[in-house]
Image (cartoon, helix red, strand yellow):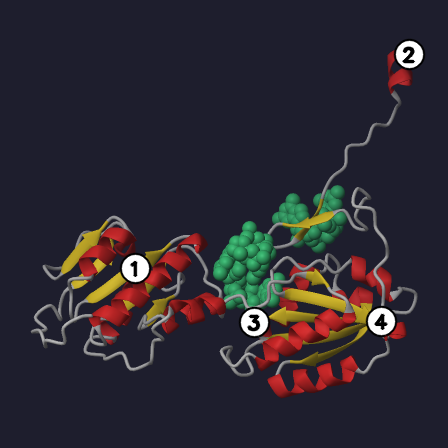
Amino acid sequence: QEETVVQPRNDEKRILSHVAVLEGAPALSEYWSLFDTNESLFNEARTTQAATIVFSLTQNNQIESMARQIHTLRRQRGSVLKIVVRENNTSLRATDERLLLGCGANMVIPWNAPLSRCLTLIESIQGQQFNRHVPEDISTLLSMTQPLKLRGYQKWDTFCDAVSNMMNNTLLPADGKGVMVALRPVPGIRIEQALTLCRPNRTGDIMTIGDNRLVLFLSFCRINDLDTALNHIFPLPTGDIFSNRMIWFEDNLISAEIVQMKMLEPEQWGKPLLVASDSKPVLNATHDGHVWRRVPEPLRLLSDAEERAS
Ligand code: C2E
Ligand code: C2E
Ligand code: C2E
């Protein structure tokens, strides 16, 4: 238990920063101290009271440990400390940003803000007091970033249960839990065939088939990003596969649709085609993070025997 002695806040002007934040520039004034690692920055920050602490995030695998450091600082050092995360060349998911802010960061500075703008933003929080509540136990916050451990095809009832659990989870942001889309295939494509073209990558993205529809739930996807997400998931433009789509993105509308879906008789539930695991994918393409690329296949024009004969 910490003693609640009011200490003088004479470190108010100090800025403790990861060296990467200044992109090679030296300390900007006597108030700046630069650290080679977030770990050494954190250790020094534990002795501060009202200083500004600037972490640098360069890899997604740093998110959890940084969240823990921020949580510790905010819980132990109080509300006058100014904690900033600078994204260096990596782009955070919205859920990650929410986690860091929930752990007690005042601000996350996006990777595409240039250094000058970054410095102005650091200036802008001087004198600020952190007012949001930070839960004592960080595991509550961590569990919110990936509540659904499922990915890909689910049976109709499993899908409905998973989505209703998400909707009923009060720790998740209201009307920000994800988007649900129902797609009906163009004439000539069976729903089971359309399913083979649906390839979610991200944990938390699930789908099911039934009643001649493919229903997808994309965790934490925002409505304005729906097409980006669908482009990651389908190797063909969705307009070529589906003639009709319906979209739900508010909690009560998603829940109401799930209630409807739960009434579908099991005979109407779709069954995925049995695909042997070593069979060729329907479309030989992989997603490289930007676009789907077809994978070239070597082809020999003459058989070995004919080649030798010539
Ligand atoms: P982006 O790829 O342009 O995606 C923008 C937003 O579309 C994402 O914001 C998310 O809301 C939605 N989205 C895109 N693809 C999917 C998907 O497959 N499933 C779901 N459920 N939603 C999707 P978000 O999450 O804030 O991510 C922001 C940016 O961070 C992404 O922009 C991407 O550049 C990067 N990113 C996030 N996660 C990953 C990842 O696992 N791998 C890679 N390579 N980049 C990622
Ligand atoms: P995951 O969340 O299951 O995502 C698996 C793969 O889906 C990613 O592999 C990436 O190829 C694709 N993906 C998911 N979301 C997006 C997106 O928004 N945009 C793009 N372009 N691709 C997306 P990757 O990148 O190798 O990541 C592997 C795992 O590492 C991810 O599994 C996740 O657990 C973690 N990860 C990667 N980036 C982020 C991130 O920005 N935030 C968090 N929290 N985790 C991340
Ligand atoms: P896109 O540029 O619209 O091309 C669509 C499809 O047309 C390609 O699908 C491929 O089947 C065919 N295609 C286009 N240009 C050529 C070409 O010069 N030679 C051959 N043999 N076929 C061509 P694919 O391969 O699945 O690529 C999908 C998308 O990925 C392309 O759309 C493009 O945006 C991007 N991409 C693929 N390869 C390259 C590349 O070498 N350079 C660039 N900058 N982008 C590429």
Q: Is residue 210 left or right of 68 when viewed as pictured?
A: right
- Distance from Cα at disc 2 to Cα at disc 1: 68 Å
Give the structural element (helix, strand or loop) at label 3: loop
Determine whether label 2 and label 1 are within 8 Å by CB. no
Location of residue 10 in the rendering, given as x and y in whole percent from the top left corner: 7, 70
Q: Is residue 280 above or below residue 106?
A: above
- Amino acid bearing label 4: Trp
- Disc with the residue nearer the chain's start (2 vs 3): 3
- Distance from Cα at disc 4 to Cα at disc 3: 26 Å
Q: Nearer the viewer, mark 2 or mark 4?
A: 4
- Disc with the residue nearer the chain's start (3 vs 1): 1
Location of residue 247 in the rendering, given as x and y in whole percent from the top left corner: 70, 79
Q: Which mark is residue 309?
A: 2
- Distance from Cα at disc 3 to Cα at disc 1: 25 Å
- Amino acid bearing label 3: Phe
Q: Which mark is residue 220?
A: 3
The residue carrying mark 1 is 55
The residue carrying mark 4 is 269
Residue that appears at 27% across and 78% down: 130
- Disc with the residue nearer the chain's start (2 vs 1): 1
Determine whether label 4 and label 3 are within 8 Å by CB. no
Q: Is residue 271 visible?
A: yes
- Ligand 1 is within 8 Å of the C-beta of the residue at disc 4: no
Give the structural element (helix, strand or loop) at label 4: loop
- Ligand 1 is within 8 Å of the C-beta of the residue at disc 3: yes
Residue that appears at 15% across and 62% down: 47
Location of residue 61 in the rendering, given as x and y in whole percent from the top left corner: 44, 53
- Disc with the residue nearer the chain's start (2 vs 4): 4
